[in-house]
Image: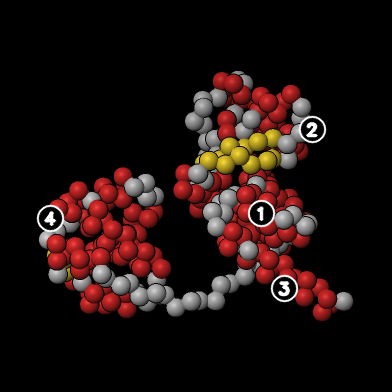
Amino acid sequence: MATLEKFSETHFIQWLENKGYTERTKKEYLIYYKKLKVFADLNQGSADMFCQSHEGNRVARSFLKTFIQFMLRNPMANLLTEPEVNLLRGIDIPLLKKQERKEPQVISKDEVFRIENCCRSEASKLMVLIAYNCGLRVSELCSIKIHDFNWEEWKIDKTKMGRLTLIGKGEKTSVLPVKPEIMQRLGEWVNNDWGKIYGSLKEIPQETILFPVSVRKFHKLLANASEKALGKRINPHRLRHSFATNLLEHNIDIKTIQRLMRHKDISSTQIYLHVDNKRLDEAIEKF
C-alpha cells in the first residue's frame, strides 16, 4: 500500500504551483486531498471508495489522477518502494458515466444590443459588447489590460479592425479582431475616464486593467441588465456561446469559429453544429 502520510499538503500545493495550476483548482484539489487522507493508504480499494463517494464528480476524479501523478513524479517520490510504485501505476480510476451534454441557450445579436442599452454606465455597455463580440470567457474579460489593444497601429486607419492580444485558458496567447466601432467607443471611454487620471493613453501604466471589475460583479450587472431588457437573467457564458452559434448561422466555417473561440479540440466547437441544426428544425416547424 502507498502510504499517504509520506506526502504532505504543502508538498502537493507546491507541486501544483510549479505545474501552473490556477488558484481555483488548487483550492478545489486541497479539499479533495483532505478527503482522500481519511483512507491513510492509496490502493485500488481506497481509490474505488473515493470515486464512489464522489460519483459523477469530474473534479474529484481529475484530482485523484493528478494526485497519483504527484506521488509518482514529485521530488519526494524516492520515498516510495518499488511495490508501492507498481501499485500506484496499476490503479484503475473508474470512468464517469457519459452524461447528456446540455445544449447552450442562444440569444440573438439584437438581444445583446438590448442588454447593452439597459446597462447603466458606458463601461458596463463596453464590457457586454466586448465579451460578446470577442467570445470571451468572463475571467478573460476581467483581466484585459488597456494596452492589450493595438492602439497606435489602429489609429493609422480607424476603419480597420483593431486587435486584442489575450492571454487565455492555459496561459495561451491569442490575437482577436475587434470591430472598429467598438475600438472607437472604447478609445473615447479610455481617454475620458482614464485620461482624467493620467492625461493621455501613453501615460497609463502598462499593467493597468481595462475594467477593474470582479467576475462576480460582472455576473451581477449582466444579470440585472438582461432581466430588464429580456425578462430573463443571462450569464457571461451564454454570451460566449451565442457569439459562436451566431457566427455559424452566418455561414462562418467551423475551423474559423474554433480559432475565435480558442478551443484546443474541435470537438468542443462542434456542439454548435447541433445547436444550429436544432434551430433550423424549429424554424421549419414554424413555417
Mark 2 element type: loop
Q: Nearer the viewer, mark 3 or mark 4?
A: 4
Instruction: Confirm whether residue 152 shows in the render.
Output: yes
The image position of residue 100, as x and y in percent, is: 55, 76
Pointers 1 and 4 in contact (CB under 8 A)?
Answer: no
Mark 1 element type: helix
**First in sequence: mark 1 vs mark 2:** 2
Q: Which mark is residue 255?
A: 1
Q: CA distance from mark 1 to mark 2?
A: 26 Å
Q: Nearer the viewer, mark 3 or mark 1?
A: 1
The image position of residue 8, as x and y in percent, is: 18, 55
Q: Residue drawn 48% across and 76% down?
A: 98
Q: Residues within 10 Å of mark 3 (few under 14, many from 20)?
A: few
Q: Which residue is mark 2?
A: 159
Quarter location, residue 83: bottom left
Q: Which mark is residue 278?
A: 3
Q: Residue type at mark 3: give it.
A: Lys
Q: Residues within 10 Å of mark 2 (few under 14, many from 20)?
A: few
Q: CA distance from mark 3 to mark 4?
A: 56 Å
Q: CA distance from mark 1 to mark 4?
A: 48 Å
Q: Which mark is residue 79?
A: 4
